[in-house]
Amino acid sequence: MSEALVATEAAGTGTEPVPAGSGARQFWRRLRTQRAALVAAGVVALLVLVAVAAPLLTAIEGQDPTTYHPSLIDSARGGVPIGSFGGMSADHWLGVEPQTGRDLFARLVYGARVSLGVALAATVIQVALGVVIGVAAALGTGWVDQLLSRLTDIFVAMPLMIMSLALLAIVPASFPRPVLVTLVIGFIAWGSISKVVRAQTLTLKGLDYVSAARLSGWGTWRIARRELLPGLAAPVITYAAILVPVNISVEAALSFLGVGVKPPTPSWGQMLTAADVWYQAAPQYLLLPAGALFVTVLALTVLGDGVRTALDPRAASRLSAGTGRRREAKAAGRDTRAGKEGTV
Amino acid sequence: MSLVQVTDLTVEFGDLKAVGGLSFTLEQGAALALVGESGSGKSTVASALLGLHNGTGARVGGSIQVAGTAVHEASDDELRRLRGAKAAMVFQDPLSSLDPYYAIGDQIAEVYRVHTRVSRRAARARAVEVLDRVGIPDAQRRSRSRPHEFSGGMRQRALIAMALACEPDLLIADEPTTALDVTVQAQILDLLHTLREETGMGLLLVTHDVGVAAESVDEVLVMRHGRVVEHGPVADVLGSPAEEYTRDLLAAVPRVDARRAARENASSDPGAQDAQDVVLEATGLRREFGRGKGAFAAVDDVSLTIRRGETLGVVGESGSGKTTLGRMLVGLLEPTTGEVRYEGHARVGVNPAVQMVFQDPVSSLNPRRSVGESIADPIRARGERDEKRIRGRVTELLERVGLEGAHYDRYPHEFSGGQRQRVGIARALAADPRVIVCDEPVSALDVTTQAQVVALLGELQRELGLALVFVAHDLAVVRQVSDRVAVMRRGRIVESGPADEVYDNPQDPYTKQLLAAVPALDPQVAARRRAARRELAAA
Amino acid sequence: MSGFGGFLLRRAVGAVITLLAISVLVYVVFYATPGNVAQITCGPRCSPEQVRQVAEQLKLDDPLYLRYWHFLVGLIAGQDYSTGTSVAHCSAPCLGLSYQSDQQVLDIILTKLPVSLSLVLGAMVLWLILGVGTGVLSAWRRGRFTERLLTGLTLAGWATPVFVIGLVLMIVVCGELQLLPFPQYVNLTDDPEQWAWNLLLPWLSLALIEAAAFARMTRASMLETLAEDHIRTFRAYGVAERTIVVRHALRGALAPVIALNANNVGSAIGGAVLTETLFGLPGIGQELVHAVNVVDLPVVVGMVLVIGFFVVLANAVADVLYAVADRRVVLT
């Protein structure tokens, strides 16, 4: 939904030399100072826990997400759950789904697995593809770069939803759906992170310490591994942190439309497909999956912001700069003459 | 009433006290320079004069009177009336200081209309008038150009024009020439001098370059760590400084007219020179950039020889091609035509025997690696695996360059710029090179640190018999270190020879122009050079 | 301005190449997949006889590149499909025949297109104004309560999936408060007022998400611009803060944001699909979902191409706008 946003937000990082104090220790220290990010991290951790422990939780409740309970719904009235609050009871902690009678709590909890799992896996694919292609484009010769950049542009231009919809149409239903959705999202939306990686690699390539490594006698591969990849860690992590909530939204949207994760496998988006019809009978049917999506995406976004700030405090300080403050002083020592135009 | 009266000025940014208890006075029409190294607080003082620290969270104490306005307690409206109209500021980097989207004439007109009630047309006419005044040719047409269409020197003139528009009583110039070539710098300083003569404007000049101060002002105030070290007429402070810091500062400034101390080894003996090995030889080097119509040659038909144990200085302004040349000598860049021979053999690509020391202390070291590891890199690249031997060698090198062996595990950000350059030198030495090409190794350093690093390079050369190629734009520094000098302009070598000959008796008009542009520390010498520049310009 | 003309030409050529590449990719992916293409294309209710006819029409015996060539030619000049008994002419640009609904794909798209365009363009106006306005305001008033409120709202807006906002809006406004009837599409040409009223909720749902994204981008860009040196220059010359923001900071801050709007269009189209489905608007998005569900291959392919075309067009326009705003880009 917001690849554009991702691009600006990540574009601020990593185009300048890494600021002082940028090791892993400093990163954790800075992250700890941001309360909002810590709260968000807690929420995310909780969600992951719920997703991982889904079988345990449903076992405690004594239900599972796929069994129909026709006795709990009133088919005469169109499938409305019997009982108040959508059929909440000691057996069904959050009530049951209209029309099918499936346990809502179980579906919610298993739905977390699908939403988080698909989003994370898709992000991994996007990052992997993006890094490989971005680095190859930046380090390759002229025509390799041209070719890969053109390819990247094409994929960036492809609207994710549309292409996902179309692709999901032609694959036979026998292929496991969550895996399919993961693959589709992962293999279509890698373009923007690839551009960021390429830009950052180009910048790093020009830095003097990389030239020094060449002068020492190291070969290209070793330089790429030892000098360039660590420099990519910061922008890639920042970008990935924003990709995850975006992917969650995309999967939810696809499932909402009925083409993503199909029943009986539960997914939060899928649970909202008929919510506009059923909300009157069972308001939690709308509120719970919608709330879950909202909270998840919000927490991940706030966490992503915190990660970005912790990785590049200078970008963050610019974002909160005062009205009259000049840009932070340049390198230690006095200003370099590198600012002279056309220093050859 | 004085033009500027500052009493007990203090400026604090959080915990950092940038300026502590500064006082000075500037009379109408007089010129004062604030001289200091980085971190001395001089720019902070300049900004404080216009109240630019308001709203930034900085705490400003003391009293500041500028052109009749009490800046330290002025309201926003009063400050706005002061800024640009009675006191105007010229900043360091003209490219980023101007709005890239609007024409220069429009920007000047806008500033003019803030302070005077005139029509747009009159404002634009005034803009053209001041642009012409600062020496921009074809001012009418060029007033419609955008900043990136001007050269660096022209842009700085445009900034000065903007400052002139409202005819202020005071001009504050914050490092106005730092980002410019030395010849352009001379032009700008001459311009400021002329404008002051014509308008009677007062001038507050902030600079790290003592020579620049000597050229342009009557009084000098030397700052260090936010405090005044010495204050007085320029001839007194620069001629016979009272304070030790000032003396050290002046001693560290390289002079372009100082002959190099005689060298101990046999390089001054002409006969021995021929017999010495030629370590690196470049023949007909040429390097093109760009394609088709946009192609240009950064380096065009350059041939050099470098012998063992000698230092070749390559001096030139921006665009001269000296950095490209340096990179070709080291093998980081392939020449379009021509070749580089190392010890007689043609060489393609890099060779650890030819190393480089880089300009920017920030980007020359991997920030994620300890300095010891960075220095150890060439040793490991050779195949050495014994950790103890590696560590031993690195410790040796660290101590050789004036750092401590215990610094092995520290990270670059824990060191100052000068120390980082030393690490860079240690790294270059770790490869056991015969030749080191130094690409502007001291330009990013303060003048006192500069002197130390230059001295270090000299020591190492004598001890190890290295050949050095010293690429720089600063003529004085180059003279200090070089045996022979090559002057580059637009990709070609216009003059070369023994350093003393080239400097004392230049043949090429460009070399003469360069030498005439170098700021002098003695005001009388400065005046003579200014006259010489005028002659050359008229010629 | 030959520099600018050259720039336009380069961008135009780039756009055409991208479109071609997309068409190749799409064609290959969809028509080269394993499985009986003719069967899929014809639909589940076709008899074997009909399937064979379809196979003939699609010239499935020809190698892939030749089929693509025919497809490309048909796109530009139209094609004739012979069924043995009759000849169906598919006028340019020919996007194929939908066997399941017995219509030309182009006709299907053309009837649905105005709905989608109404939705997307109307929402675009809304989100640009809302988003940029909010972003500029929150950058200007940084540190004060207004800014915190706005930042919080935009964050919340961005985190909510578009269909959730639509659902909530629909339920609250139409169901509970009954301020508006449930939207039903009315043609612009028939009744402009009703057209606008009915589209109000869909516009809002689509615009709010994109506005939130925009607001965040604009705020970040604005803050960065305000910290730049040339802003400091004008402050040092006594120019009023408001003038600085509007005249000097805005253009620099908006230029990259405009360029990224092109990306936004791509994601907005996705949002449009969701909004159409939710509100039951008979647009391209809804048709696409339907086609996907019944696996009507020609319609799916046709839609993807048309939408891809609009996205590339939007990208190109955004590039040109960026160059107009910031002349330095022309040099690239």
Image (spheres, coloured by chain):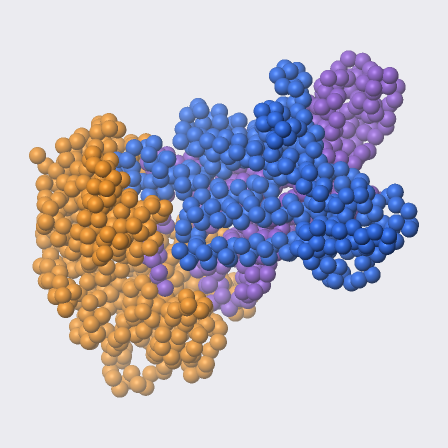
Q: Residue furthest front?
A: C86
Q: Colour of chain A?
A: purple
Q: Colour of chain B?
A: orange
Front residue (pair B80, C315): C315
Q: Is residue C152 visible?
A: yes
Q: Viewed as shown, does residue A19 lie left or right of A232?
A: left
Q: Total marks drawn?
A: 0
How far across and down, in percent of the image, does residue A130 sit? 61, 52
Above or below, A214 against B493 in this view is above
How far across and down, in percent of the image, does residue B1 sit? 8, 34
At 59% from the left edge and 29% from the top edge, which residue is drawn?
C203
Q: Colour of chain C?
A: blue
Q: Is residue B156 visible?
A: no
Above or below, B495 against B439 in this view is below
Above or below, B274 against C98 in this view is below
Q: Viewed as shown, does residue B195 lie left or right of C251?
A: left
Quadrant, the C terminus of chain B: bottom left
Above or below, A155 against A242 in this view is below
Q: Viewed as shown, does residue A135 lie left or right of B329?
A: right
How far across and down, in percent of the image, does residue C66 sit? 74, 62
At 28% from the left edge and 85% from the top edge, which residue is drawn?
B272
Front residue (pair B14, C93): C93
At 40% from the left edge and 56% from the top edge, which residue is drawn?
C1
Front residue (pair B52, B498): B52
Q: Residue furthest right?
A: C48
How far across and down, in percent of the image, does residue A138 sit? 54, 59
**Residue A60, located in which quarter of the rendered image?**
top right
Q: Residue furthest top?
A: A84
